[in-house]
Image (cartoon, grey):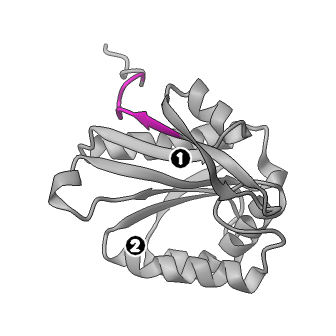
Amino acid sequence: MNIVRLDAAHLADLTPSLAELLADTVDGGASVGFLAPLDRAEAAGWWKERSAAVTEGRLAVWAAYEEPGRALGTVSLALPDKPNSAHRAELVKLMVHRAARGRGLGRRLLTVAEEAAAARGFTLLHLDTETGSPAERLYRSSGWTPVGTIPDYAADPAGVLRPTTIYYKRPGAGLVPPATG
């Protein structure tokens, strides 16, 4: 499976597939900011709105695919826009299509984002995720540290208010260094 960083042109080319991925993620119960069922046109519009942020360097997006034009997963880093936050980024919208789950793709996408953050010199990453979700188990098992839980933070795809847990990680911490000769 290929994982590539998307520029605005690739984002535009993949918008229909990314819209399908987003809708599938929401329809599968993941709390990524939308209510189910998510209309494909609304999902495509949301991805199109990300294009300016990618072009301006405020958002880095990676997509995973097995065949060209069919996104099976994605992860993004929201990059800092203020001088006092230049050392940190927010991990956002880690999604894996239901047809691709259980093969380690979520962990691979997470690792790509963490390694890219470390390479750019970020010393802190943070995220929020629905408390008790499969995503939370992934973050905990990947060395992310929970900070606390906020009750009734956001509605899940069914519209039920759910708590969210805030996490942080120092990029590069826990990564295996390359072997030396």
Residue located at (79% from left, 38% from top): 102
Please state the horizontal and vertical placement of residue 67, each as a whole percent of the image: 71, 63
| Quarter location, residue 103 | top right
Q: Is residue 19 above or below residue 138?
A: below
According to the picture, the residue beneath numbered tag 2 turns out to be 54
Apparent side of residue 139 relative to residue 28 in the rendered image (left or right)? left
Apparent side of residue 129 relative to residue 179 in the rendered image (left or right)? right
Magenta-drawn segment: 166-174
Disc 2 or 1, which lies upstream in sequence? 2
Hey, what amino acid is under mark 1? Asp
| Quarter location, residue 126 | top left
Residue located at (23% from left, 52% from top): 85
Within-10-Å neighbours for mark 1: few <14, some 14–19, many 20+: many
Please state the horizontal and vertical placement of residue 55, each as a whole percent of the image: 36, 77
According to the picture, the residue beneath numbered tag 1 turns out to be 128
Q: Is residue 88 above or below residue 35?
A: above
Please state the horizontal and vertical placement of residue 62, each as a whole percent of the image: 51, 58
